[in-house]
Image (cartoon, rainbow, N blue to C red):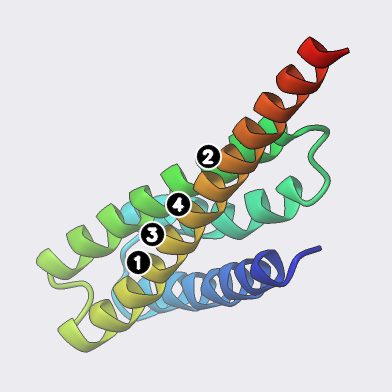
Amino acid sequence: MKKKESILREKSYLFAVRIVRLSQYLQQQKKEFILNKQILRSGTAIGALVREAEYAQSNADFIGKLSISLKEANETDYWLLLLKDTEYLDLKLYDSLHQDCDELVSMLVSSVKTTKQREAKHSSLFTLHSSLV
């Protein structure tokens, strides 16, 4: 596992822990259950998909898993904003969670982009090599 991916693995896991704690807070303190289920699902899926990508069967599978993780991170950001705007989250808590989520989005975009570039480079080298043989 590359250093970048291990950082993504760790940060996505720690974010999932924060989301679980947020879910407990929303249930116990705010008595909010519907939005809570949505953010719990999407917020914990990010790390689960990152872990799944570690054992991807191909570059395409790896890119697919991280792309879905990116979608889940974007959805989580939506639920965070909605919870803030409906006053279930105060600004301080929102800002902290949003910052972590935004960092995950950036890391996921970078990982997908880098993998696609490597795949394209490898593909063009293979094509070049095949044409010379």
List the residue tagged with mark 2. Answer: 68
Q: Residue at x 19, y 58 (%)?
A: 82
CB atoms of marks 4 and 3 within 8 Å: no
The numbered mark, 2 or 4, whose residue comes first in the sequence reads 2
Which mark lies nearer to you, 1 or 3? 1
CB atoms of marks 1 and 3 within 8 Å: no
Question: Which quarter of the picture shows residue 23?
Answer: bottom left
Circle 2 crowding by C-alpha within 10 Å: few under 14, some 14–19, many from 20: some
What amino acid does circle 1 point to? Asp
Q: CA distance from mark 1 to mark 2?
A: 15 Å
Res 75 visible: yes
Foreground of the two, 69 or 81? 69
Question: Which quarter of the picture shows residue 11?
Answer: bottom right
The numbered mark, 4 or 1, whose residue comes first in the sequence reads 1
Circle 1 crowding by C-alpha within 10 Å: few under 14, some 14–19, many from 20: some
Which mark lies nearer to you, 4 or 1? 4
Q: CA distance from mark 4 to mark 1?
A: 11 Å
What amino acid does circle 3 point to? Asn
Q: CA distance from mark 1 to mark 3?
A: 19 Å
Looking at the rendered structure, the secondary structure element under dot 4 is helix
List the residue tagged with mark 4. Answer: 109
The numbered mark, 4 or 3, whose residue comes first in the sequence reads 3
Which mark lies nearer to you, 4 or 3? 4
Q: Position of residue 14 (x, y in %)?
A: 59, 77
> In the picture shown, does residue 1 fall above or below 38?
below
What amino acid does circle 2 point to? Ile
Please identify the quadrant where the C terminus is shown.
top right
Most distant residue in the right direction: 133
List the residue tagged with mark 1. Answer: 102
